[in-house]
Amino acid sequence: MGDLLGVAVLGAGHMGADHIRRLDRVVSGARVAAVADPDGTRAKEATAGIEGVSVHTDVEAALDAPGVDAVLIASPGPAHEDALLAAFARRLPVLCEKPMVPDSTGALRVVEAEARLGRRLAQIGFMRRYDAEYRQLKSLLDGGDLGRPLMLHCTHRNVSSPPGFTSAMLINSSVSHEIDAARWLLGQELTAVTVLRPRSSAGAPQGLTDPQFVLFETERGALVDVEVFVNCGFGYEVRCEAVCEQGSARIGDTRSMAVTRRGLAGQEVPQDYLVRFADAYEREVQDWVDATRRGEVTGPSAWDGYAASVVAEAGVRALETGARTPVELAPRPELYAAPTR
Amino acid sequence: MGDLLGVAVLGAGHMGADHIRRLDRVVSGARVAAVADPDGTRAKEATAGIEGVSVHTDVEAALDAPGVDAVLIASPGPAHEDALLAAFARRLPVLCEKPMVPDSTGALRVVEAEARLGRRLAQIGFMRRYDAEYRQLKSLLDGGDLGRPLMLHCTHRNVSSPPGFTSAMLINSSVSHEIDAARWLLGQELTAVTVLRPRSSAGAPQGLTDPQFVLFETERGALVDVEVFVNCGFGYEVRCEAVCEQGSARIGDTRSMAVTRRGLAGQEVPQDYLVRFADAYEREVQDWVDATRRGEVTGPSAWDGYAASVVAEAGVRALETGARTPVELAPRPELYAAPTR
Amino acid sequence: MGDLLGVAVLGAGHMGADHIRRLDRVVSGARVAAVADPDGTRAKEATAGIEGVSVHTDVEAALDAPGVDAVLIASPGPAHEDALLAAFARRLPVLCEKPMVPDSTGALRVVEAEARLGRRLAQIGFMRRYDAEYRQLKSLLDGGDLGRPLMLHCTHRNVSSPPGFTSAMLINSSVSHEIDAARWLLGQELTAVTVLRPRSSAGAPQGLTDPQFVLFETERGALVDVEVFVNCGFGYEVRCEAVCEQGSARIGDTRSMAVTRRGLAGQEVPQDYLVRFADAYEREVQDWVDATRRGEVTGPSAWDGYAASVVAEAGVRALETGARTPVELAPRPELYAAPTR
Amino acid sequence: MGDLLGVAVLGAGHMGADHIRRLDRVVSGARVAAVADPDGTRAKEATAGIEGVSVHTDVEAALDAPGVDAVLIASPGPAHEDALLAAFARRLPVLCEKPMVPDSTGALRVVEAEARLGRRLAQIGFMRRYDAEYRQLKSLLDGGDLGRPLMLHCTHRNVSSPPGFTSAMLINSSVSHEIDAARWLLGQELTAVTVLRPRSSAGAPQGLTDPQFVLFETERGALVDVEVFVNCGFGYEVRCEAVCEQGSARIGDTRSMAVTRRGLAGQEVPQDYLVRFADAYEREVQDWVDATRRGEVTGPSAWDGYAASVVAEAGVRALETGARTPVELAPRPELYAAPTR
């Protein structure tokens, strides 16, 4: 490998600061070349002690700063579309946090812009594809030893939801991970969604429909069910069981050290996604840096980002209406392969 | 305890013969006093070596045989109604295998007949209520430490289905266990049912809709989902996870001896219900014998048998129509308490 | 099967009362015909409500009481030898709780007395041989699929020791179970024993050497290590891992319902042997009743009881001296086969 | 952080090449500045595509090459002493693979040389201290919630041993990991060692004593037992259970994805240490690079390397003599703290 990859990081909030730290101290082969955040102080704090980095309040200035070879977008969702198009205009490779673009119309514009370029520049931050257990499961399903998958049973639990979390966000923020994971694991588009509402937990904020039970159908007839429960109180649990024609496989129950005391054999449950998926974030960014230095674009595509938006929007409508809601995708440009399987 | 309880066993087929063996050799305090089966040879074989038993081809003759104190009905479902009414007429306590009566109209007639007697005589053979793990779960839910239950996720898998098994039987034979277990665990009636059909497995017989994914709603808003897959090929798996407001509990993953060899740490999966629920059958019959000798009737009631019939019928309609189907129960006679909780 | 087996139970203390209950209410095919206890009140209380039982303060009177077909010895260890010889004199089959006879000299006299009779009458209460997991492990080892066993790693933990428990009793009361289990699982006699003393736990009573770490060698070169820790405070844990030439197998880690709450995924640890081995006691007594009614004697023999005494005595010497201590058995009478394997 | 740390890697064999790859592509903040290997071709192959690296057949030349800030020693054990002293002479921080020096006399010379310098330069490659589960266990023990540790039960199994592996190497190569882990976890020196020899496995090469069962005593009375079995055939298993006064904790049983098919619920067992401890190697080297760039030396010290040599030598004598063998350490120089706890 040659010189370090100079990365412009857009957004220096919680997620952006974590990516800046990761690029500076954890990931090999990259350096933070520029950071942009409307809040200049925040950007300065996040880059303290890093040599050779320029700090900006303007996205375009950061992209044009010296030494910038690639872009990592960690700004709020509504800012993603402009940032992506600005990076495309400069032919800069991009790693864009999810959601790619919050609304599917904007997401489609990004897809069309990249399709017009005729080559992929964007990778979307669906980091579960980089988790060791998800990769094991994907590899097992692709190997075909268990036969065709018929059902995925998914669980997505958080200890508690942040302030301002809405019933729709259980779908378009939480379940959006399962939307991409299901598309990727099965290699199929999702075609319809239904949302059931069990009684809400006394532990959920007033007015929040929590838990929800979401059902997806796929183009080749598999069924995906997701329990999403963001105020479960007891831990961060992400599980997935694939039921196939000749066997089943389950991930997410892994625990490490077992402690026995006072009549109980117990194992800790992680309390948040940064613990559970720490390795996945590292592997995602390292893979992106490595591929970019080789001149390649791999990983989840803008099409994957777009499809996730469309499904999430259908999910929110299904939550509101209580009805089974079809998912309608635009035609897939040739640039993007069908979901891998 | 005093003399042995003399039991008339109706039906000497697979299940009847097993109960005869159990009463004769395993259960304490009972003896097989009479056996009736239209196939006299079969009845004779099942009672070989048992002293003091009379063998009949006629049900009423068996009930009237000397030494008969109680009745265990293990004949085919269509014969249950007449047998129950004959036992009621003689004021004989009855343990009746499930389904109590295959159709809900007949089941209601049994309920009404017992209600007219003004006291309970019948216990229905929902043996999961006697399984150690189900009892642990019931006790935990009733204790209230986990808060109110919001969802039950259930799995019911068989290695393969017997010849002649129909798509409706996945509901009214297999899922009927989960119907009773959910009513009992939650202490609530089920109020609606929806059946989803993922693609059928290549391992299922031609024309069988297998697996199915069944959703029940309850009177206080809990959601119960059941994966039923009777040709899964890999084992007999019955699992249940209760998701509550302050925690979750899961049964059915218990394995015993762990063997490591050739790169695999493995544990055997039971291949059928007689292995998985052997203890439950013993405990059920022993409890029935003990209670009967004390002059009491405990355990699942005729109302539980009736409710299970009604829900199963609604489930079969839901399978056929694809629509959410309400469950309509007759008024509950005073004799029967609400589902315990 | 014919008439009920009439059993004389000797001893109506904690263990005796439990066996009386088991014979009366749980086990099929037996009845309690007589009970002897020096404390007549205790015997009466233990038999309250049982019909046709005679109560005695004298052992011989109980053995000679009407309806006695067999004997269950649950009196204190020092009374066992006389009781066994009295039963032998009457040709009565016996189930004798462990230890068969506390000292090996007395145990050898029992062996010789039975050998003179020329047929087996005694079964010794090593109930682990009737535990489902131990049987699975035995069956796996006997099947040979894992190759020859090289090591057994055993754990024996109690929450706390009863008053008056001595350092020697960790060997001759607690580890005596592992002594029999190792002989039975491996089908080999134990040939030497060493006892190591880690620092004693602050939770152990003053002066008690607890935990201890005991090493046994076998006649064909296997090594058996046992952690015995009778004041561990956290639960009753009995585990055994067999390490073989082509794989390993582990029992005793089985847990049932898993409960997740407050960041911890936990499973209950049983608190005493009556919970952990409840089924084993039932199966042991039921098997003894069944075999006795068939006129057979199966299960652990007087030789097994004798060998356990000899090994335990060597273990206590090894504890006292700190040295490796050989185990010296008398010649095995023809009546007794070598340890099964 | 400032400039990249330039590392001279000594040794370009299996382990050295892996560290070169790790420094070049995985670890952040470092670059490979020089490589030395007597086999120049091997060094060239291992550095193919790395910019700015110089290749040498001579150790001193590599240490003196431009851009070298620190040294990673991955040459064969007998070359370590000279390499360490050469690095000390240049005041270069060193990460030295285990064993630090194969014989304790040479190891003591290294300790004395560093002590004369008056400051630590060397970190020894006991990478288990960087494994997530070992760190969890260390943290739990140090927290004191379980009370004082009384015993460690350790298992160390390899699928098969490499050609030329001797009975002594089970101690001084395999068990040396447990020697350091026990010292570190307990914060105590080991004071005596005994080695037992169960029958050797038919799967072990002719003449190899495998498995062995090793017992260590510690200065405050804890007992450490290690099953080492390097031809177990079925997997790479490293487990450790700490038994404390108020509870026990176990690591190494962690499995990830569970697959059920054909009657077996199975989880893969890793086949070698590079899979099991991949993360530990990364974390070890990353931590060393980070600390070195901060001007600090952390991690296992030369004293830890020396103590491990002394214990391993005593272990080999114990294997040969069959006797309990005391461990005699030289006085600990002030530079080195007592084992942490």
Image: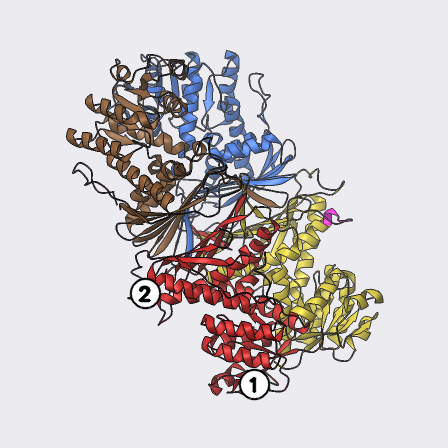
Chain colours: A blue, B yellow, C red, D brown
Q: What's the residue type where badge 2 is placed? A: Leu
Disc marking residue C208 = 2
- On screen, D194 above or below C47? above
Residue named by callout 1: C62
Is there any visible trace of residue C51 in the rendered image? Answer: yes
Residue visible at 78% across and 68% down? B82
Label 2 lies in what chain? C
**Image location (x, y in percent) of residue A251:** 51, 40
Q: Which residues are magenta?
A: B161-168
| Amino acid at pointer 1 | Ala
In which image quadrant can residue B48 be found?
A: bottom right
Instruction: Report whether B316 appears left or right of D8.
Output: right
- Between discs 1 and 2, the one toward the N terminus: 1
- Chain letter of the residue carrying label 1: C
Q: How many marks?
A: 2
Question: Is residue D156 part of the magenta span, yes or no?
Answer: no
Q: Main secondary structure of the magenta part?
A: loop
Q: Position of residue D329 (x, y in %)?
A: 23, 42
Q: Position of residue D13 (x, y in %)?
A: 40, 22
Tell me the tag on residue B85: none
Element marked by disc 1:
helix
